[in-house]
Each structure stands twice: as structure tokens, then as C-alpha cells.
Image (tube, coloured by chain):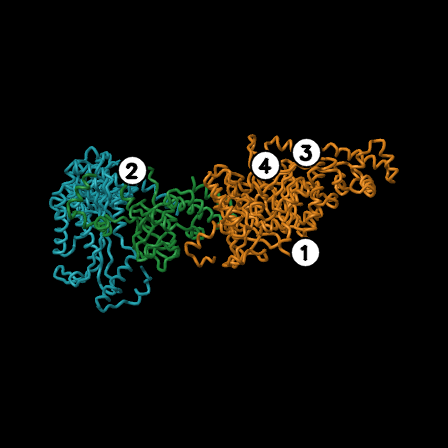
Amino acid sequence: MTRVENVKERKPSPLSRFMPDEMAKRDGAGAERTYVGEVVESSTTELIAEARELHGGPSFGEFIRIEADLPVLGIIFNVFTHSIEPNRRPTAYGKTEEELRLEQPQIFELLRTEFQALIIGYLDGGAPVQILPPQPARIHSFVHLCTDEEVRAFTGNDDYLRRILNTSKVPTDELLIAVLRHTLRAHKHSRDYLVRMGKELSRLMGDDYDRLSSVIRRVAN
Amino acid sequence: MAKSKGDGATAKTRGEAIGVITKGSLVEGLEMKLDSAQNVEDMKAGKFVVIEGDKNDFFSMVTDMRLDAKNQEVLLHPPGREDDILRKVLAGTSTYNIVSLRPMLMMPKGAVDDDGPRPVKAIPSHFSEVQEAMEHDVAKIFGKEGDPEGRYFSIGNPLDMDTQVCLDMIRFAERSNGIFGKTGTGKSFLTRLALCGLIHYDKAVNLIFDMHNEYGFKAMKENGSSSTFVKGLKQLFGERVAIFSLDPQSTRARGVQADHEVYISYDQITVEDIAPLQDELRLNPTAVESAYLVYAIYKERWLRTLLALEGPDVEEFAREIGAHAGSLVALHRKLKRLENFPFMVSKVTDGDVVDRIMEYLDKGINVVLEFGQQTSMLCYLLVANIIARRIHEMYVKKSERFYATQRTEDQPRQLMITIEEAHKFLNPTAAKQTIFGTIAREMRKYYVSLLVVDQRPSSIDDEVLSQIGTRITALLNDEKDIQAVLTGVSGTEGLRSVLASLDSKQQALILGHAVPMPVVVKTRDYDTQFYKDMGCLDDLPEAERKAKIDKGTVALYGDN
Amino acid sequence: MVVDERRVQEDFRAKLELALAEYRRWEPEWQTLATKINKSRTSWLLPGMADGLGGGVERPERPAEISIAATDGSQIFPDRHEVSSCFLINIGYILLHYGTGEKPLMSSKPTLYYREEEIFEEWGGRRMFVNRDLVGFKRSLMEFTELADLALAAKAEGHPVVALSDGTLILWNLEGKPQDFKESYLQTTLEAMDSLRDARIPVAGYISQPGSQELINALKLGLCPLEVADCDRCPWQAENQLGFNEDEIGAIQDDLWRGHGLPCSPLEGLNDAVLVSHVLSPGQRTPLYLSTSKILNEYGSHRIYYFYLDVGAEIGRVEIPEWVATDPELLELVHACMCDQADKGQGYPVALAEAHERAVVRGADRDTFYRFLRDTFVKNNIQTSISTKSFKKRYVGI
């Protein structure tokens, strides 16, 4: 690996003319940026972004912010890694990832991690708004993870829970649990907060006590 | 008090929100869904709350609570003990608490103080907020001690509040009142408190038939195993209280010099005085008729004459006067018991005791009649009857004179007669025979009212009960007693549960004439502070006491 | 039908058995055959033998750290239906680093040729529009020069590297082209070879499912009763019988009419791969043979050697320049890397497969290309025309 670093110091690299444009860009100006992905599909209600690194997508249920004039906020409801070539499927090699990295390095270039986010609101002048944004996030905007502070600000009230419960895309409860666990962490594991959200869920779920208790138990664990 | 006023001061005038009104009716009372942040265990029966309606504030009392669940599933699979979070989540959502409220009074918002609270004729709208009552709410309704008229006397604090609940002593004195509660719940303590109020604010002069020697001088304070003594009325009010004793020896033994010893001559006892003793003496009606026969011939000497006879002569005597021999013999035998009372004398030497009592009362001096060792019911009934009847007669005369002259100086002082074990005097049979029944029924026509102290209100005649203005009730268990106390009060459903759930000490439900709405109080402490409030100077440092006495003298007699 | 099929199969097996028998017969006496090859003049291509005819060489071990460079190309041919008679060559670059975990380079670079001087060339004194044929040449030349550049760059960055080219290194199809064209292309190729040699970067061309028959041809030569074969004057060909005497003809005709055809006929229809597949076990290669293509006479020090390699799934043909063939270290490296590459690519060298994937221009890309072109032309206010036929095929893209 030391060799690689040495190589980087020599500029311009003899290989740079063979590098794909985006790779050259990434090694340059983008290197110090902290984004986790880039939007590749966008709509009012959800978006798909490509992770900056393979397997480097945000976690299920995590809160993200998309750069824009009115930054869009979303929660990850699906992360998937797939072949970038439509007609080439990954096959089993029977090797560890370490072995594959050494001996089949090309396969990792053929995989992309992408993530799907449910849009839950936006920031207006830094203040969270629990309404779908007037304009969707733009393609190629950068995606950032929300800070705990941003999560706290956005989840101060319970409107986001309704948004999650109203989505039919994913196993809602699983998403709910994952989101609540992230939220709870941002709220410093406050039991009061959990109870408050639990009550809201109880209201939103109506008579479904089994469901409620299962969600609460799994969040609290 | 509209929220829109919104400044800091206004905000403070509202207590903590504890829930919202969800349903109810004027007749059956209201239901509040308890805010999930509140603990249902804090909602005690009798708690005083304010419902903030759109136009009115409704002053209400907590009468009942209920645990409820939206979903039966929750009840079939309750969260485990360790499932603390889930429990908290369910609280107020799937599981919730309903608190029943009884609106007692309503007051239009923004009403000036003179408007005062009114009876409830409306109910608040859905989701009206329910708040803990605050001091000023309580004061608005019950007034505050220290008004210039001396009208309000603090009897204690509402449950879980640190503010006064006052009795309107003018209204209290106007009507007969009852103090109820089963044994050991502090009836005599409540009575002493009420008497202190009457004496201190001088709203009525009292005649107290003190069966157990609890009011005049020191009294035992029941305080678990250890007993301490508390000050009696004499100690608190000094010259304004006179102690009469039926048993001066006993009184002396307790270190007190009675102001007056009481003796009763046989001639002072009328048949009417004997009649109410039928139960105690186990007389049958014919025996009483026989007594009337004797009276018809011998007039006031009837008893003396009868008791002078020896056993065998009675039958002879019966034949002479045409009475039934058996009855008269029985009457004679039973009345013989009266001879055993030390205070029964053939001739009183230093004037009629009733006249003496009347003298005191006229001067506004309260009279405590101690029975000393003479604690038998027979004795108590007899003496109370004799004295009360004669006092009443005098009051009737005085009143009629006043009605005739209509001169203020002729107006008799309002008299309140305190009797214990009142059901003995006022049970349906006795109430028709004793003077107390008459007093109770007459109301304040003749300026005499009763303060009845009893543990079995159900035994008191309904008609009498219905005339009782203010009821101060400690814990009662017996359903009949509870029913009796609530006779003549509307909306008793809620109060019933309140009554049954009172603490056995220092708690009482007050309802009736002297309070605008029923209220549960933690009664005032009967302690040094109270003595001081009552103007008792014993415990004050010398200089301060002197200053006060001087001031009092000046007020009474002018500056010279 | 079934009977026919079976007879064909039986016939084939008989031929194969004969070929194997011949192969084994010559194995120890390969030099005799080699001498005969050198002396004879055949109508078919014969292998030059350097170190034997047969026998497998075991697969050597691959160095733990090695980088493989590979390129492939594709093109969009000039299309008269489109707005402009331009063409595009897309080169896919692959540089895989083994044993270091380093991020591989996988990319492609298209080059657009649209200028007047780019779409018209003058060869042999004739100015001509660049046709499909020329574009093909241009592409394969570029594949090779770019491979050399890529490998050199990798080497310059400190990677030990092996360069793999898709297909033959023998530019036999330059034969018959105008001399200036041929020279120009050869020169460029050989200059790339020179730089690779100077950097000591082994380069190898891999031919999958080779149809070549050089070994079979050698065995056919071995079957020829003549001491020095000269096909042009083959006595078993009727038109050549004029010069033989009766006896000779009689003997020959006996053979001929006994159904054997020419003496070399029994091996007709076989190729080297079939033969070798029965000789090698996986990982083994054949000895080196020297290609005798005529064009190689102009390769100088880069004359091409080849060997067959059993990569398991198939027999592949690996072509290497002389300086690799004669350097045992480089030869072993090529052998080892080829086997390894084929293992990783399920029978086909993975670097080449990936290079192909990068290079290939798909239909959608093609349309994007033309759309881009048109937009560019419109932007630059150049009048363009699109034939309606092509227009209909379009779809709305990104």
C-alpha cells in the first residue's frame, strides 16, 4: 500500500489518462467532501442515490440531507448493491471478500451500492418542515448524513412517524423500528422521548396492539 | 381570564392542566380523560379542580376514577412488569384513565368578585381543559379568613392544596348543623373547631352539652398510642366561656374550677322530660300516660310525690288517682333511678340553674355543661332535655317580644345548642317528643339552632336531617349513614364515593348551607398556631400579650 | 441421416486416432520432421519448431503480485444515414492488480473522427473515404498501441505488468494492402513492440477457439511419402501426373483409388485444438512453435511464436513475440498469467473479457452518440440532415 501512496505524490500519474472521468474527479476535488452518495433518481416522494463507496451507503432507517437551496430530508428505506451491467450477474466464487479483493479485483468495480430514501421533509432556512419539498432533489446532488442535531430538530414532533406509516413501499414496521432507533440515539436514548413517540404510534396504529408492542419492544432493546 | 390576555400574571392564575372533558351530563356529572402525563394515583376522590369552559369556569370535585382500555387485546396480553416503556406508551393511549367530576359551581369568566359563583346550570363543551384548582379559585368560592365582617372561618385545606377552605360562619349560625363520622374519625375535634369559629367570630352563643368533658377544658388528643392534651374552649376564650358542671368533684379532679355547679330539683322535671326517656328507661306508653295522671293532680310536684312513695304504696296511689296500677308501679320503679343522680336535689338552694345559664347566654358567654362522671345516656338525655326545653321556652318568649317590639336591643342572640349522640334525641320517635326535634324543625324562627354530633346519622329522623343546614362529615362506612348524610343534597352519586374514601383522620366532607359547594378538606391543625389565631394569648410572650390586652381594652371601653 | 451422422463421427474418430498416432510417432523424432518442414514447400502453413513437437509443459506458478493490462476496441462505423460521416473508436482499458488489493483501473475512451482529414485518407496514391475496412484496421492498431501505453504507464508506476491483447499479433491481413499503408501500420505496431521489449513487459495475444491447423499440417507433411514435399507438384493430383513414369503412377494410383485420396488426406478436417486437447492436461502448454506467416518476415526481432494452452474449458492459442519466447522468465510469466486469467474468467482471460465489456458500443450508446453529435452540430449552427430511416429508430434518451 505504501507504493500506492508514493504513486499519488507523483503528479500527474502516468495512468491518469486511462482513468474514467468520474474516478479522476473523485480523487481530486471531491476527496475532502463528506457526502455519502449522489442522487441518480429523484421524485417528490423518494429518491435513489449512488453510494460514494461500494457498500458505503447509509444504514437502513438513517436520516439524510440532500444539498439544495431547500435541503431535502429523507430516510433510507432500502440499500442495495447490484451489478452495473444489466446483463451480468454476480456469481458465487466461494472466496472471502479479502481473497476476492486480491484475486478478483474487477468484480468490485462492477458493483454499485445504491440507496433509496423516502422523502420526509425539507429545511427552510435551517428550520425543519415536515412537508414534502416543493421541488424534488436534483439529480447529481450530494447526499449527506444528517447530524444528530438535525435529526433531533426534525424529530422533535411526531409527524415523521405518520409519513413512514403511510408508505407502502417497505416493511413499514421494520423501517419504523430502524428510524426510531436512529432517532432515539440522536435524542440521547431519552426514555421520555421514546414514550412520547410510542404514544403517537399507539394513536396512529389504532387498535393494533400486537404491532405496537412489537415495535416498542424492538426499539427499546 | 381568557387565555388571550396571555400576560405572565394571567398565566399564573391557571393551574396545571390535568385532562380534558370527554363526556357527561348535567345530571350525571362529567367525565375527564386524564392527561397521560398525570398519574391516576394523584387523582384522589374529593380533589378540587376547575374546568375551563368557553364562557364559564366550573368548579368541580373529583368523585370517581376508572381504568379503561381502548382495546381488549391489551387487557388480554398486558405488558410484562419489565416492559416499562410499553406500559408508559400505553398509558393515556390504549389504556387511559377516566376521572368522574361533579361540577359544583360555575362562574362566568371575567366576572367581578361580587358576582360570585352560581349553581351549575350548564356544562362545559367537549375537550374543555381541566386544571388543578389554585388558591385564588378556592378563595373565590370559599372566601378568605380575615374579612372585615368576620364571616369566613378557615376549617382546613382542600385535598393536596395549601390553601384555606372557609365556612361562612354567618350562614353556619343561621341553621342547624351536623357533624358526622364514625367513631374515632375526629368528630369532637371537628366540633371543637366549629365551636371555636362560632365563638371567635361571635356569630352565635353556644350551649354545649359536653357529655364526655371534651370541650370546656383540656381534652385528650387522640394521637395513636401517645395522648396529649389540647386546649379547651375555656382556655382559648377565657371569660367568654363558662363551665357548668353536673359533677363538680370530677371537674375539680381534672384541675378545673367549674363556674357553676348544676343541681336539678324534682320539681323542675316535667312529664315531657320523662317521655323521651322511654327507650332508656324502657317505659311503655301507658307508663307515660300514668305520669300525666300524676301530673294532672300534683302539677310540678308530681315527680317528688311519686318518688316519695314506697313500693307497696304505689298500687294504692294508683287506685286513688285512677291510674293503671301495673303501669304506675313500673313507672315508679324506673324513675327511682333518678334518685341516684347526685345532681338531683329536692330543693335547689342558689337559684334555678337554667336561669343562671340564660343569664350567661344573654351576656354572650358560652356555656359548656360538663357531665363529669355522669356519662350515662339516661343522665345526658334527661339533663339536656330539661335544660334545653327551658332555654328554648325562654328564647321563644324573647323572640316573640322582639317580634312585637322590633327593637334591635330586644333581638335575642343567636343560640346554638351542641348535643352529642344526637340520634338519641332525634330518632324518629324521640324527635317528636324532645325539644330538640322542635328546635330542629323550627329552624331559626326563635334564634335557636342545633349543632348535632353523631356517628349514626341514619338513626336521625329524616325530617330533622333535611333541616340540617351544614354537614361536616368525617369518614362513614355504613351505606345507610352515608345515604342519610346526603339526604336533601343533589348529585349525591359522586359524593357517596367521596365520603366512603375519606381518610379516617383529619379529613372531612363539608356540604350545605355554609359552603357554596361540597368540598373535602384536610382539617386545620388544632395547634399552637390555631390557638394564636383564635386570640388565645397564653403562649405569647408577656410584652406582646400585654399590648394586645391593652388594645382590646381600649376597643371595648374607649380610651380612658 | 442418423447413419450418415454416425459415419461422420466414426470417420472423425479414425482421423483423430491417426493424428494422435502420428503425433506420438514424430514426438521423439521431431527434428527429422522439422528438417522436412524446412525443406518442403507446401500449400499450407507449417509451424517452425524450436523445442519439440509435443509434450506438455506444466503450468508455472504465478507471482503473487502481478498486474495484467488489457485492451479491446469497438467502433461505430461511418453511417451514411446519419448526420455526419464520422466514426468512433472506443477503447476499453483494463489494468488489474493482483495480490495487492489495489483498486483496478477499468475504463473506456471513445475517440471521435469527424474532420475532413480524418474521414478521408490517401493510400497508394488514392484518396479514399474511410470505409469499414479501414476503421477496423485503425481500431486494431489502436488496441495494440494503447495496450502498450497502458502497460508502460503501469510499469512506470511500479507495477510488474503483463500485457494481454485480444486476438492474433500477426497482422496477416495487411498482406495485399497498399505498400505505404502496410508499412505505416507495421511500423506503428513494431514501435509499440519495441517499447514493450525495452520495458521488458511481456505481451501476448490470446486466441480463443483457434481454428489454426499448423500442427496438423506438420503431421500431414509427415504422411507425405515424398522425402521433400512440394504440393505444387504433388503427384497425387491428377493434373500433376504428367511428369511421372508409368510405374510411379501405378503405385500412386493404387493408393489413390483405394479410397485414400492424397496421402495427406486422412488428416484433412482436423485442427490443432482438437489434437492438442487430447495431449495436454489443464494448465499445460505445448512447446513453442514459430509462426511462418509471410508478414512476419517484416517483424524483425518481434517474430511471433505461439503455443497452445489447455485452460481447462478450451484450448487457446497464445502468441508472443520472439523476445518473450526466448526469455524463459517472461515465457513462464505469460504461461502462468494466461492460465490464471482463464481460471478467473471461466475459461477466457478475465482482463480481456472486461476490456471487451468496456469497449463494446451498444445500440443505446450508438444512438446517444448520434444524438450527441446532432446536438453538437445544432449548437454550433452547422446544417445537418438526418435520413428519415434512421430517425424512426430513435427513442427518447436521457
Contact, CB < 8 Å: mark 2 with mark 3? no
Foreground tag (4 vs 1): 1
- Provide the chain ID for the residue under circle 3: B
Chain in cyan on the image: C
Chain in green on the image: A
Rendered location of residue B69, percent (x, y): 55, 46
Position of A130 with respect to B336 (left or right) is left
Q: Which amino acid, mark 3?
A: Gln
| Alpha carbons under labels 2 and 4: distance apart | 99 Å
Vertical side of C369 occupied by B560: above or below: above
Which circle's residue, 4 or 1, is located before the other in the chain?
A: 4
Q: Which residue is mark 4?
A: B217
Vertical side of B455 occupied by A75: above or below: below
- Provide the chain ID for the residue under circle 4: B
Q: Which amino acid, mark 1?
A: Tyr
Q: Which amino acid, mark 2?
A: Glu
Q: Which residue is mark 3?
A: B374
- Provide the chain ID for the residue under circle 1: B
Marker disc for residue B403: 1
- Along the line of sight, the residue nearer the viewer: A182 or C330: A182
